[in-house]
Amino acid sequence: MAIMLTAIGLMSGTSLDGVDVALIETDGKQVRAFGPSGYRAYTDHERGLLRQALNEAPNLLHREARPGILREAERIVTLAHAEAVAIFTSHNRISYEDIDIVGFHGQTVLHRPAEKMTVQIGDGPALAKAIHIPVMHDFRAADVDAGGQGAPLVPVYHRALAQSLEREGPIVVVNIGGVSNITYIDGPNTLIACDTGPGNALLDDHIFRTMGQPFDCEGRTAAQGAVDVAWVMRALQHPFFALPPPKSLDRNDFASLKVRDMSPADGAATLTALTAEAIARIVPLLPKEPKCWIVAGGGARNLTMLRMLRERLDPATVEAADALGWSADAIEAQAFGFLAARGLKGLPLSYPATTGVPIPMTGGVIARP
C-alpha cells in the first residue's frame, strides 16, 4: 500500500496578491484528502517591493544572484511565507510534527527558459529553519537545465484531480493566474500542457494604474466596458500564440501591450477579452476539441472572464473549479504540496508533452530544518 504523506503547499503567483497555503494528504499519485487552506495577503509595501524586483530581474546574469532590491525582496518573500505557515498551522491547530513536507514555490521574477534561466526568489533553507519542517523548493530548475520550459508544473496535479471525475474527455483545466496555462487530459495516458498567454497580469496592472485597486473584482469594471476588438487582434499577432504546446512565457513578455488610451472600463474589457481569446487560440493546437473546461485561479472569480470564455469555447462547457468541489483559490498551493510529495518519492514532475523536457523529470531541492 502506498505511503501517504501530509504536505503543505505554498504558492505566490505572478499576480502578486499574496501567499496561498493548502494542506493535502497524498502519495504523490492520488489525493486521499483535502485539508484546510489559507491565505496571507501581501501588504502594499511588500507588493511594491516585488514590483521593483520584477523590474530589476531582467538584468540578472546568474539565477542565484540577488543584487540590489532583489535581496530585500527575497527576504520579504521568505518571511511572508514563514508567517503564512505559522498563521495557518496555529489557526487550524496543526502540529509541525504532523507535516511531512512543505512545497515552497517562491516568487517568480524571471522566466526565460530559452536562455535556461528561471528565477524564483525565496530562501528554502531559511524557511525550513523558521517553520521547523522540511521544505522542498526550486522546483523548476532541473527541468529548465534539461532543456524544458520549466512550466507549467501543475498538470500532474490536474490529472490526479480529473481522475476523480466521471466524465468523458478530453477535459481541459485552465488556471488563470498572472499567466494562463492549460492542462489537456484525455484518459490516463494523454497529458499535454502549456502557457496560453496573459492571465490576470496585464488586467491587474491596468486596474492598479487607473483605479488604484489590486484587481477587477468579479470582472465588474470589464462588464461596464467595450472590447476594442481590433486591439485584441493586433495583440494576438504575437508569434507566441501560434506556437504548439509545450510552451511557456514570462509575466512581463507582454508588458509592451498598452491600453493607455482607453478608459478604465474599456481597457479592462479589452484585456479580459485578450486573455479569453488567447485561451481559445490553443484549441486548434490540441489533438481533439475539448468537451469541458474547468477554470481555476483568480480568473475563476471573474464573472466577465467566465462569460467571455463560455461564448468563445461553445459548445464545450465551462465551469469554475469550485462548482466541482475543487478549490479555485487553493488549487496551485495544493499542487505544490502534491509536487513536493512526488519529488520526495522521485516521481516525475514534468514530461515531454507538458514542458518539452526530453524525458520525464523529477525535481525540487530539499532543505531540512
Image (cartoon, rainbow, N blue to C red):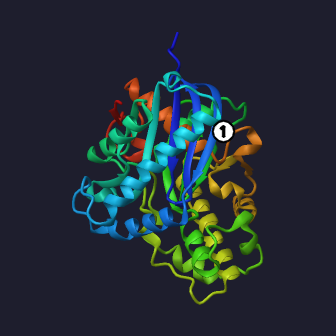
Compared across the picture, whether 35 is left or right of 156 comes to right
The picture places residue 138, in percent across and down from the top left corner, at 35, 43
Compared across the picture, whether 324 is left or right of 78 comes to right
The picture places residue 44, in percent across and down from the top left corner, at 54, 66
Q: Residue at x 76, y 73 (%)?
A: 223
Most foreground residue, 96 or 230: 96
Most foreground residue, 108 or 359: 108
Q: Residue at x 45, y 56 (%)?
A: 244
Most foreground residue, 19 or 145: 19
Q: Is residue 52 depicted above or below 348 in this figure? A: below
Q: Which amino acid does the dot numbered 1 rest on?
A: Gly
Q: Residue at x 49, y 59 (%)?
A: 14
Q: Is residue 253 depicted above or below 84 in this figure? A: below
Q: Residue furthest bottom?
A: 261
Which type of secondary structure does the marked residue at label 1 adopt? Answer: loop
Q: Residue furthest left?
A: 61
Q: Is residue 205 depicted above or below 176 in this figure? A: below
Q: Quadrant of the C terminus?
A: top left
Whether residue 187 appears in this view of the structure is no
Whether residue 229 appears in this view of the structure is yes
The picture places residue 64, in percent across and down from the top left corner, at 25, 52
State the residue position of label 1: 169
For the image, the number of numbered tags is 1
Q: Residue furthest top?
A: 1
